[in-house]
Image: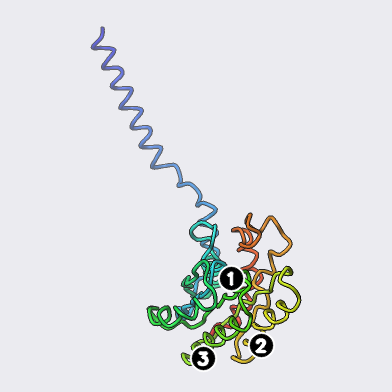
Amino acid sequence: MYIFRSARLAVALVATLALVACHKDTVPPPPPSAQAHEAASEPAVKGPEVDILALGDSLLAGYGLNFGESYPAKLEKALRARGINARVSNAGVSGNTTADGLARLAFTLDNQPRPPGLVILSLGGNDMLRGLPPADARKNLDAILAEFDKRHIPVVIMGILAAPNLGPSYARDFDGIFPALAKKHHDVLVPFFLAAVVGKPELVQADHVHPTALGVDAIVKATIDTVVKALP
């Protein structure tokens, strides 16, 4: 009786496995995921690859954010979504002043795989937060932009505005740096890099300075057209 029951179970198991195998062959594959559909709907990148170097401080480095959430990373994704074959290298270092940026400029440029076709420059915020003399920031930024001129690299300058607590005199001297240098070196200017997140606490981290991931999205949306127009 036990052998007979075991044989019946074995037959049933074989039949079930055969049915499952048959079902796998006849059921159509599942529909593609929403992510795959989105990727398929994006325009294909075209043209030669353009290297963009993002040189700056924590606003580019992605302070407080996860991997892939920094401005350079999201800018690259947004550019490629428009069909632009861009690669953005993140050379942002948290805490850098304009003097720090100038000190590492030649090393950074000389160690790129290829000369960048465009530079995004965001320096000066730490000079301002530390109350360093605007004249020094201007001198350092002028030297940085002169080096880009020498290498025939166009620049998008991400301007910064002084905090109100530093007083009107400091704000006047500091705020004027970026438009004056953009005009002198014939570079493109974003007047205030953080304009898209100012007054929006939900887009700024607890330090009230650095954008959240959603804040970076807002900044990319506000600046991408300027970057596109500056591309060679």
In the rendered image, residue 111, in percent from the top left (x then y), is placed at: 38, 78
**Outermost top residue:** 1
To which quarter of the image does residue 203 belong?
Answer: bottom right
Residue at position x 55%, y 53% from top? 34
Secondary structure of the residue carrying numbered label 2? helix
Q: Which amino acid does label 3 sit on?
A: Asp
The residue to which callout 3 is attached is 149
In the foreground, 148 or 113: 148
To which quarter of the image does residue 140 belong?
Answer: bottom right
Secondary structure of the residue carrying numbered label 1? helix
Sooner in the amino-acid sequence: mark 2 or mark 1: 1
Sooner in the amino-acid sequence: mark 3 or mark 2: 3
| CA separation in Å, label 2 and label 1 | 19 Å
The residue to which callout 1 is attached is 126
> Crowdedness of circle 2 by 10 Å Cα count: few (<14), some, many (20+)?
some
The residue to which callout 2 is attached is 180
In the foreground, 11 or 122: 122
| CA separation in Å, label 1 and label 3 | 24 Å
To which quarter of the image does residue 214 belong?
Answer: bottom right
> Crowdedness of circle 1 by 10 Å Cα count: few (<14), some, many (20+)?
some
Secondary structure of the residue carrying numbered label 3? helix
In the rendered image, residue 106, in percent from the top left (x then y), is placed at: 42, 83
Closer to the eye: label 2 or 1? 1
